Image: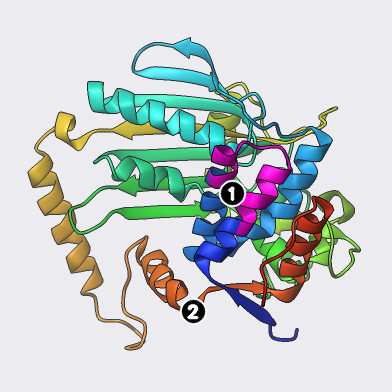
């Protein structure tokens, strides 16, 4: 596969452009700015799979009525230290933020809170919500699924049974938070989307065909598609593989049970008559200050992380990193170079903007 051909766009310019797109699509300026900030933040962190490559798909979903602007979560159950919320198919960046803010508020008051969220639009990069919690001194744990979206084959299988089922943990520390955030699939579906738009190629064993052959070809998941335009996972006959063999497959199952079955939003399957997909998220917020000796926790945790990172590296040019370190490095670099987007992905965003009467940035 040819090397990606990138266009580099400054952070502020891209964020302003995407904000204009979502304002034109029917969001309030505040909500449009929130969606844009989240998507551009994902690109800034190096998680291009959850960044602005999603813009055409979000606008398409909004036009179809699958995701709704201006939603406020409904409270289904409120037990003080546990809350179940319904996102009413609002933009995930809106309703998941509301759910996270509530969890943070309750955990700061009581020391802990469990928040279930169902029927949310695509919430984007889960690490964003962990970062919100760690900024307030809280630990957070997030189990996520996608109801109605079957993309991933379980260990040993060739048929789709799981969503990409992300898992995330955030731990606040004085020298900066530790954020573990990953899809339980070998790659996020967004990375297949990026690769299909001329971006970074997939590993050759990221996907599996219906016949059980390893594949790195996005057509395995999407079927036939044009160089620029929408991608439909229903068009392909293959699946994404679970990461880590039986371990990732088992964690994916737990994400489906906790974020899907327990919240009432539904698991990825079996497929029934469902017009739209939706994220579910079960989040646990813990206050180290309430739990015990916060200073002692910080000292022990920071000391241990430093010791782990002091391990002699197999490659002297690749030192040991803690979860969240690569994102910090990418943010620093991309704030200087601009955010890289493949030209096909960028053209797809420009086409979406044009369909809403929005002109792209000049000189790019």
Residue drawn at point x = 20 percent, y = 59 percent: 175
Look at the image and say whether residue 20 sits in the magenta stretch: yes
In terms of secondary structure, where does tag 1 sit? helix
Answer whether labels 2 and 1 touch (C-beta < 8 Å).
no
Residue drawn at point x = 47 percent, y = 63 percent: 45
Q: Which residue is label 2 attached to? A: 337
Which quarter of the figure has residue 93? top right
How far is disc 2 from disc 1 in space, using C-alphas? 37 Å
**Quadrant including the N terminus:** bottom right
Residue drawn at point x = 29 percent, y = 47 percent: 171
How are the colours assigned in the image?
Answer: rainbow
Q: Is residue 97 left or right of residue 277?
A: left
Count neighbours of disc 2 (C-alpha within 10 A) and say few if under 14, some if 14 to 19, many if 20 or more: few
Count neighbours of disc 1 (C-alpha within 10 A) and say few if under 14, some if 14 to 19, many if 20 or more: many
Q: Magenta residues: mostly which secondary structure?
A: helix
Range covered by the magenta-colored residues: 17-33
Q: Which residue is label 1 attached to? A: 249
Residue 254 appears in the rendering:
no
Counting from the top left corner in percent of width and height, residue 7 is at 65, 78
- Along the viewing direction, whichever of 20 and 39 lies nearer the viewer: 20
């Amino acid at each position: 596969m040819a090397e990606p051909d990138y266009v580099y766009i400054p952070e502020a310019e891209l964020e302003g452009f995407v904000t204009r797109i979502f304002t034109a699509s029917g969001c309030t300026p505040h909500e449009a700015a929130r969606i844009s900030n989240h998507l551009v933040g994902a690109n800034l962190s190096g998680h291009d799979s959850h960044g602005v490559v999603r813009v055409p798909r979000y606008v398409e979903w909004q036009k179809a009525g699958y995701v709704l602007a201006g939603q406020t979560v409904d409270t289904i159950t409120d037990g003080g230290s546990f809350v179940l919320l319904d996102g009413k198919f609002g933009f995930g960046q809106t309703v998941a933020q509301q759910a996270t803010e509530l969890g943070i508020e309750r955990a700061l008051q009581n020391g802990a809170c469990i928040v279930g969220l169902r029927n949310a639009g695509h919430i984007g990069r889960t690490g964003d919500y962990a970062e919100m919690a760690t900024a307030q001194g809280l630990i957070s744990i997030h189990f996520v699924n996608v109801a109605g979206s079957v993309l991933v084959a379980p260990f040993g299988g060739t048929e789709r049974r799981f969503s990409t089922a992300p898992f995330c943990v955030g731990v606040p520390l004085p020298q900066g938070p530790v954020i573990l955030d990953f899809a339980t699939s070998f790659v996020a579906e967004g990375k297949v989307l990026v690769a299909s738009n001329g971006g970074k190629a997939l590993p050759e064993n990221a996907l599996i065909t219906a016949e059980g052959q390893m594949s790195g070809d996005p057509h395995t998941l999407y079927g036939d598609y044009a160089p620029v335009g929408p991608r439909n996972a229903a068009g392909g006959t293959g699946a994404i593989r679970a990461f880590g063999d039986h371990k990732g497959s088992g964690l994916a199952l737990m994400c489906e049970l906790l974020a899907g079955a327990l919240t009432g939003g539904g698991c990825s399957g079996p497929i029934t008559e469902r017009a739209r997909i939706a994220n579910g998220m079960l989040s646990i917020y813990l206050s180290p200050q309430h739990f015990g000796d916060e200073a002692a926790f910080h000292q022990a945790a920071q000391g241990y992380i430093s010791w782990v990172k002091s391990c002699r590296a197999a490659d002297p040019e690749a030192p040991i990193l803690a979860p969240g370190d690569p994102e910090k490095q990418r943010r620093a670099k991309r704030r200087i170079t601009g955010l890289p987007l493949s030209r096909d992905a960028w053209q797809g965003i420009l086409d979406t903007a044009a369909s809403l009467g929005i002109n792209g940035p000049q000189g790019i």
